Amino acid sequence: MSWHAQLALQYRQHAGKTSVHFSHDGPLRILKSLYPEGPGICHNVLVHPPGGLVGGDVLDISVEVAAGAHALVTTPGATRFYKSNGQPALQCTRLQLQAGARLEWLPLEAIAYNACDAANELQMELAPGAELLSWDITALGLPLAGQPFVQGVFSQHIAWPGHFLERGRIRADDGLLLNGQLGLAGQRCMGSLVYASGSPIARAQREALLESTQLLLEAAPAEVMAGVTAPNEHMLVLRGLAPVVEPAMQLWKTVWGHWRSSLWGLPAQRPRIWSM
């Protein structure tokens, strides 16, 4: 039996407070809204009780943030794409930000288990003045648990029409891609951290952030290979590879906090769920 779960989040700002209205169908919802930074920033934890996806499962998530609202959404644990039963599993996320909105989309890692047939899609749309901090971290198999990724396929799609498009497809039997020096170089965790702005980022600000972020990368754990770029005047993109999730996640949280402080003047208020 497959699950087709849907969740729609709508964030609004009124009298200085960001609140959320949500609708859902199937085993996908958010927990109670939290305000550790005050009423202006709404923190939510997205939960999927089954704990993972098998063949035929679909998670369909949409997030809309209205003008002036600020939301931070994370998850309590990894998204797991389990061994396929012959059908693909899909997670599709759509983020829509109105003018002046801010969203921090920070799910914990996705794990592509051996023999999975999985796709993870992220689509974003930002009005002028909107700002998004979003990351994506994917682990291929569980090598430290003796469960390497030796069979199956994982596809990833990240798109902001007119600004950014990434489409990737990794087959477990593609040794040149997985182990070649122009591919993943034997690493089994890959990640992206994106800052996207609906309005152009001033050149001086882009260059300052690139320079300060590069200093953080130089001090990063030695097993993480990472680089930061500004592919256009609306974005900063950090990309990286690591043997496992933990060192990559440590670096991503550090850079996220730095960008949050530099861009918005806000401290790196980590969701409490990350410490559990």
Image (spheres, helix red, strand yellow):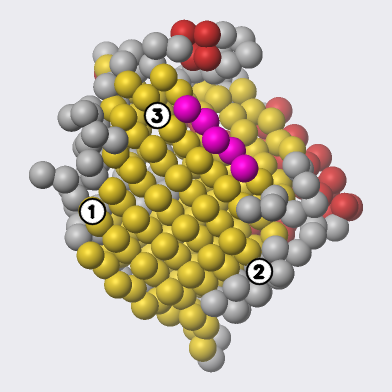
The image position of residue 156, as x and y in percent, is 47, 36
- Which residue appears farthest toward the right when viewing the image? 204
- Which residue appears farthest toward the left when viewing the image? 1
Instruction: Find the magenta span and give its range.
Output: 165-169
CA neighbours of label 1 inside 10 A, class few (<14), some (14 to 19), many (20+): some
Say which amino acid is labelled 2: Ala
Residue 145 relative to residue 270: left or right: left
- Which residue appears farthest toward the bottom when viewing the image? 15
Quadrant of the image containing the N terminus: top left
Q: Tell me which residue sits at (31%, 16%) in the image.
A: 151
* Mark before the other along the chain sequence, 2 or 1: 1
Say which amino acid is labelled 3: Phe
Q: Tell me which residue sits at (66%, 69%) in the image.
A: 127
Pointer 3: what residue?
154
Which label belongs to residue 127? 2
Say which amino acid is labelled 1: His
Pointer 1: what residue?
4
In terms of depth relative to the viewer, which is nearer, 39 or 111? Answer: 111
The image position of residue 192, as x and y in percent, is 57, 38
Does residue 189 lie above or below 73 as drawn? above
Rounded to the nearest whole Å, what is the CA distance between mark 2 and mark 3? 31 Å
The image position of residue 146, as x and y in percent, is 27, 14
Rounded to the nearest whole Å, what is the CA distance between mark 2 and mark 1? 30 Å
Name the magenta segment's main secondary structure.
Answer: strand
CA neighbours of label 2 inside 10 A, class few (<14), some (14 to 19), many (20+): some
Q: Tell me which residue sits at (24%, 34%) in the image.
A: 87
